[in-house]
Each structure stands twice: as structure tokens, then as C-alpha cells.
Amino acid sequence: MPSPVDLRSILPVDLPLVERLWQLYRHDLSEFRGTLPDDSGMFTRGRLPTYLQDPASSGYIICQDTRPVGFAFVSGSESQPLRICEFFVVRAARGSGVGRLAARQLLAKHTGRWEIPFQEENPAAARFWRRLAAEVCPTGYREERRAVPGKPHIPPDTWLLLTEPRRTVVAPSG
């Protein structure tokens, strides 16, 4: 049984924490995308500033036993469909059920149609999201392959489209 998992909204005071977790996230993605850190040893901030400033985005810190173990960013909170833009759990917490519980809480926080993109070249992410989609949308979900805008050298992303997600409320553990 995983330890208690909770999502808490990112506050301005959390910015240094989110930026540190973002570096771990970008490091993990570098395995699949071949990106390298800059001359100072830092990975690019990419879309992080947009997520933090966009009123149509919601950001959450994933906590296990009150300790930060990841983050999630959702867009589309002002218009449908909702989209999981980024979802990250530190390696030490993976495989323990933390990500699954956090993702279910995330889907329960925002009702509506969902799009969940991921890269097929990350097999753990592909398994995770397909398993979760089957759990929360037992009547089925659709998959699409979509090119990454402005990046023709990168393989297309897979997008899961959940059109009838189950509306079960998942309360935080603990």
C-alpha cells in the first residue's frame, strides 16, 4: 500500500521547488529526446514559465507523506478539453502507486474531456497512461498520433482521448 499521496496547488513560494523538480524531469526526458544541459549544467526551462503564468493552466505538487515527489500541469481549465501537459514523479517513488493515485486525483479535480499526450519511446509512460485510461474510462478511450509542432525531427506523440471518464472522487490518502 503506497504512503498517503496528495496534490497541492503550486503557490508562488513553491517556485524554487518546482524549478528543482523540473531539472530532474528534464534530465529524465533527456534519455528519450537526446537533450543536453547548457554550459552551466542546467536543462532548459522550456514551457515551465508558461505553465506558471497562464491562468488557463493549473499546477500541482505531488506529495507523498507531505514530501514533494513530483508535479503535474493541466491546461484547458477555462475551456475543454483538459490536457495533462506535464506529469512527473521522482524515480524513487515510481512503481509504488504514487503516480497512479496522483493521476486519479488530478482527473477527479477537473471534470470534462481529457487529452493525455506521451511519447511512445518512453515505454514506462506509455504503459502507465494506457493502464490509467483503461481504469478511469472503462467504456474505452481513443488514441491518436500527432506530430510535435515545430519539431519534425521528433517522433509523433501519442494522445489518449478520454471521452467518458468515470466520475469517481478520489480522496487524498491519510
Image: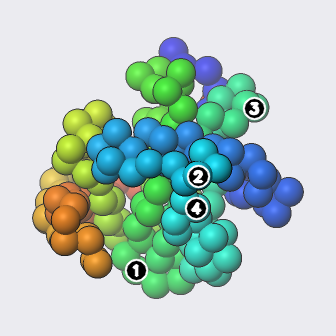
Q: CA distance from mark 4 to mark 1?
A: 26 Å
Sequence-first tag of 3 and 1: 3
Q: Residue at x 68, y 45 (%)?
A: 20
> Can you say whether 157 is above or below 47 in the image?
above
Q: Who is closer to the viewer here, 86 or 64? A: 86
Residue 28 percent location from the top left of the image: 44, 39
Horizontal side, residue 16 vs residue 116: left or right: right
Q: Residue at x 29, y 34 (%)?
A: 124
Closest to the camera, between mark 1 and mark 2, is 2
Q: Residue at x 47, y 56 (%)?
A: 86
Neighbour tally class for label 3: few under 14, some 14-19, many 20 plus, Cα within 10 Å? few
Name which quarter of the figure residue 174 lies in.
top right
**Residue underneath mark 4:** 45
> Can you say whether 24 is above or below 115 in the image?
above
**Residue underneath mark 1:** 80
Sequence-first tag of 2 and 3: 2
- At mark 3, the secondary structure is loop
Sequence-first tag of 2 and 4: 2
Q: Residue furthest bottom?
A: 79
Residue 30 percent location from the top left of the image: 39, 45
Closest to the camera, between mark 2 and mark 4, is 2
> Can you say whether 25 is above or below 1 in the image?
below
Q: What's under tag 2, amino acid-wise?
A: Asp
